[in-house]
Amino acid sequence: MILGLDIGGANTKAASSEGMFAESVYLPLWKHAPLEEVLDRFAARRPEAVAVVITGELADCFSCKREGISALTGAVRQAFSCPVYFWGADGFSWIDPLELAAANWAASATLVAREMGDCLFVDMGSTTTDLIAIRDEKTLAARTDFLRLAAGELVYMGLLRTRLDALLPQARIGGRKVPLAPEFFAIMADARLGLGQIGEQRYSCETPDGAGKKRLDALRRLARSVCADLDEIGEPAALAIAQQACERQRSILIAALQRQVRKHELRRVVAAGIGEELIAQTAAFLGLDCMRLSQIYGEKISDVFPAYAVARLAEKKISEAAGCTRIAGI
């Protein structure tokens, strides 16, 4: 087995190259989550090799990206005794460790480019959304988060962890326009849980208040976002906040897709991640063809696609190296 790892700030994801194993573990690095324990558990599966992409270097437990890369690559090397390959923005060949920073999108887009051709690859996770144009098997994207953020290729908005007040400055409630408190009271997972769009299991991150993940818990947090108790404004008002937050998120995604497809003259979207359904809905609204990776590889692989992609890419690299060795020995 060749194991792929995607080590993010909030989640660490793993997948095998043949697609039989896929797992996502909530590991908030800034809270000193037990990454080493999870890596040791993955190492117990005895992979032939491990391929890694990293995005967790931005977690604010690290003073800078270089420190984060050093800590995370060190943890991986410590956990695995097999060969380890790290993927950078331009592939497995890199010189400066900073080339490894936030390069998970590059692994995903490289595999999509090889297997699916020209498209806008869109991957929405719990925290962020990547939008990568692909033409002639080339990824047309900037090489750092800063530059991708500036170009609209990275939208810092995800299906679950994004704060409501970051998306929705004010909500319409009972004829009033009420500002949302700029506080960590509610997140998009609460809006989607309250509306029945996700269940408790899909609420895979921590809750803002440390309380439960029942629908009533989410409604209470939604009410708190406008400095109210649920019995003060009622369930319809809480659901109105949730609905408006979801509409706002959809409008942001529509604008982001429009910007990239117009810039690169693309008509097809390839959707991945836990936000795949929202991406597909947005593509349909814009009249774009959409291919959902869950329909090709399964939902679990779509959710952890960078880990799967880097495993597949490592498998090809190892196979090619073995082929060259056999030829040289003839």
Image: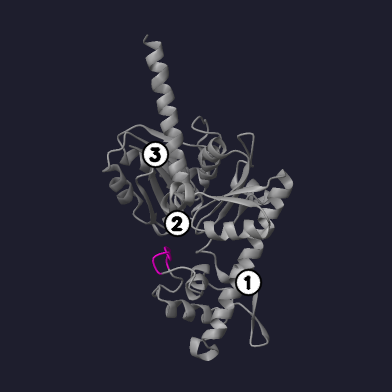
Name the residue tied to disc 3.
17
Q: Position of residue 251 (x, y in %)?
A: 66, 64
Task: Determine the residue positioned at 41% across, 44% down.
Answer: 5
Q: Is the magenta stretch mostly helix, strand or loop?
A: loop
Q: Which of marks 2 and 3 is nearer the N terminus?
A: 2
Asked if residue 323 can be seen in this view, the reply is: yes
Horizontally, residue 14 falls left or right of residue 110, namely left
Element carrying mark 3: loop
| As drawn, 228 above or below 218 | below
Disc 3 to disc 1: CB gap under 8 Å = no
Question: How dense is the environment of label 2, judged by Cα within 10 Å: few (below 14), some, or many (20 and up)?
Answer: many
Q: How far apart are marks 2 and 3 (CA)?
A: 23 Å
Name the residue tied to disc 2.
10
Task: Determine the residue positioned at 57% across, 84% down.
Answer: 237
Horizontally, residue 57 falls left or right of residue 140, namely left
Give the residue type at disc 1: Leu
Disc 2 to disc 3: CB gap under 8 Å = no
Element carrying mark 1: loop
In the picture, which quadrant includes the C terminus?
Answer: top left
Toward the viewer: 166 or 318? Answer: 318
Residue 168: mark = 1
